[in-house]
Image (cartoon, rainbow, N blue to C red):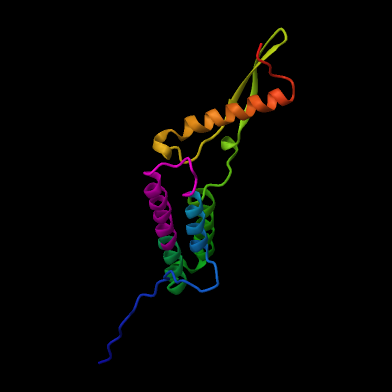
Amino acid sequence: MVSYKFLRSRLEEQEQAGKQTLISLIRQWYQVWLQDPDLVLEDQHLLPDEWEQKIDLLKIKLNKIFQKILNPGVDETRLDDYSLKFVEWLHDSFKESNIAWKEPQVQLTNIQGSAMQFSVRFYVDNIQLEYWRRGNRIQNEVRREMVQCLRQAYIYTLG
């Protein structure tokens, strides 16, 4: 009687001297982000935890595709669908791409005589950073930048 032992192959992360991988670049990116002086102590743990969780999910998804390639079975004709779905996930969920509704918007909302009123909208990512004060800080920075630009254009004066 012949006995077969089936080993399940899987992809594993490996450090490659001199070569940068997607995962190593992601880790470098969030390490640089951790140098942001506006981040608070809690963010030093929050940010790496969030990105390591995303990296783990990336590995799981890649291993699922790898398993489908190794053992396609009835899914052989759907390998391209699995790959396209993975690329879509990378684009939409792993590192969110620029979506139209996240783009800054400036709208003219009212005109009264020589005065014009505008509405400014902008998206703030990772709002939970800086003890949930990130949105307020960025709102203040945007307001300061707008006032500075309007002053330089001689549109805004102090009465």
Above or below, 5 against 138 in this view is below
Residue 98 shown left or right of residue 12 in the figure: right
**Which residue occupies 54% across, 52% down?**
91
Q: Quadrant of residue 54?
A: bottom left
**Which residue occupies 37% across, 49% down?**
45
**Which residue occupies 51% across, 65% down?**
79
Q: Residue furthest top?
A: 113
Above or below, 150 against 130 in this view is above
Q: Position of residue 12 (x, y in %)?
A: 41, 70
Q: Quadrant of the C terminus?
A: top right
User: Which sits in the foreground, 117 or 67?
Assistant: 117
Residue 84 shown left or right of residue 112 in the figure: left
User: Which sits in the foreground, 83 or 102?
Assistant: 102
Q: Position of residue 53 (x, y in %)?
A: 39, 54
Q: Position of residue 84 (x, y in %)?
A: 54, 58
Above or below, 113 against 78 in this view is above
Q: Residue 50 colored magenta? A: yes
Q: Quadrant of the N terminus?
A: bottom left
Q: Residue furthest right?
A: 153
Q: Position of residue 128 (x, y in %)?
A: 41, 38
Which residues, given as a range, are shown in magenta?
A: 34-59
Q: Residue 41 colored magenta? A: yes
**Which residue occupies 40% across, 56% down?**
52
Residue 20 shown left or right of residue 47 in the figure: right
For the image shown, how many numbered marks are present on the structure?
0
Q: Quadrant of residue 61?
A: bottom left
Secondary structure predominantly adopted by residues drawn in magenta? helix
Residue 93 shown left or right of residue 3 in the figure: right
Above or below, 27 against 12 in this view is above
